[in-house]
Amino acid sequence: MKKILTAVVGMTFLLCYLGWENSGHTFDTKPSSIVNKISRDEKRVKESISDAAMEANGKASDDEKMISADTNGAEGVAAFTDPSSLLVLVNKQYGLPEEYRPRDLVYPDVPFLFSDKIDKRKMREEAAKALEQLFSGAKEDGISLMGVSAYRSYKTQTDLFDYYVHREGEKAAETFSAFPGHSEHETGLAIDVTGGDGRCAAEDCFADTEAAKWLAEHAHEYGFIIRYPEGKEQITGYKYEPWHIRYVGKKSAKEMAERGITLEEFLTPEQTGAK
Ligand SMILES: [Zn+2]
């Protein structure tokens, strides 16, 4: 029975993730009670974060928000709790509201492992442009790159997390998959990339490739950071992921690269003990 359930959930997830959710098909996913409970708990956390963000931003216009994010720098709460900020912090502690959907998602003009024009190919406009520049910069250095997975909606993340919980249990799923609202892919600012041969896509062996070395050295020049660096697992909450890059803008990326710090240390130095 459990096997059948796992298979059904697996199929549902795969179909959703392949983009059917965008073509008008609907799926009746039946999350387990565990997941429902997690979702409820997680929603409470999210609501309080979202309230804090609204409070921090008040009735500020988009321009004012940009200014406050800039002038407050690392200390500014608005800079990382505003879902639309380029510095939004999304991790196990901070999440995005369920209704948040980036308004400026576009298709970056770079090759992906797949050819379908689906959500997971999209990024926010500024990040997409920067990604195009990063890919051509890599090419000039003789490194070819491919996109693996970029934007993911709250619903897709829910299906993904449910699928892992059914497959491996809640405890295991938590170690490698994010709760809905807590995946950086939901910001439209993050993308998993791999080398042009497509091998080791989102796998540990990617770390030893030329593409990974190039990214570690040059991503910040284009405004991206290696979001989950080696040796920072305790701070980011994630194991080393050399393939997951996150757009934060050139100025911030350069500073983080030079200081060798993570986004958590950059934005919440008081919580992470960063100097
Ligand atoms: Zn990723």
Image: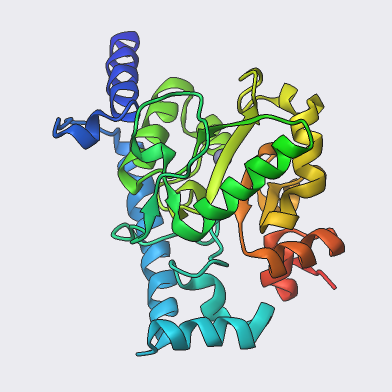
Residue 120 visible here: yes
At x 44%, y 77%, the residue is 53
State whether residue 150 is above or below residue 56: above
At x 39%, y 71%, the residue is 50
The x and y percentages for residue 84 are 44, 68
Q: Which quarter of the figure has residue 214?
A: top right
User: The C terminus lies in which quarter of the figure?
Assistant: bottom right
At x 28%, y 60%, the residue is 99
User: The N terminus lies in which quarter of the figure?
Assistant: top left
Side of 11 relative to 62 (left or right): left
At x 30%, y 33%, the residue is 32
Which sits in the foreground, 123 or 139? 139
Residue 240 visible here: no
Tell me the quadrant of ligand 1. Answer: top right
Which sits in the foreground, 11 or 46? 11
The furthest residue to the front? 140
The x and y percentages for residue 241 are 69, 38
The x and y percentages for residue 216 are 79, 44
Which sits in the foreground, 189 or 137? 137
Side of 237 relative to 15 (left or right): right
Q: Which quarter of the figure has residue 224?
A: bottom right
Which sits in the foreground, 78 or 22? 22
What number of labels is visible?
0
Side of 203 relative to 95 (left or right): right
The x and y percentages for residue 250 are 68, 64
Q: Which quarter of the figure has residue 270?
A: bottom right
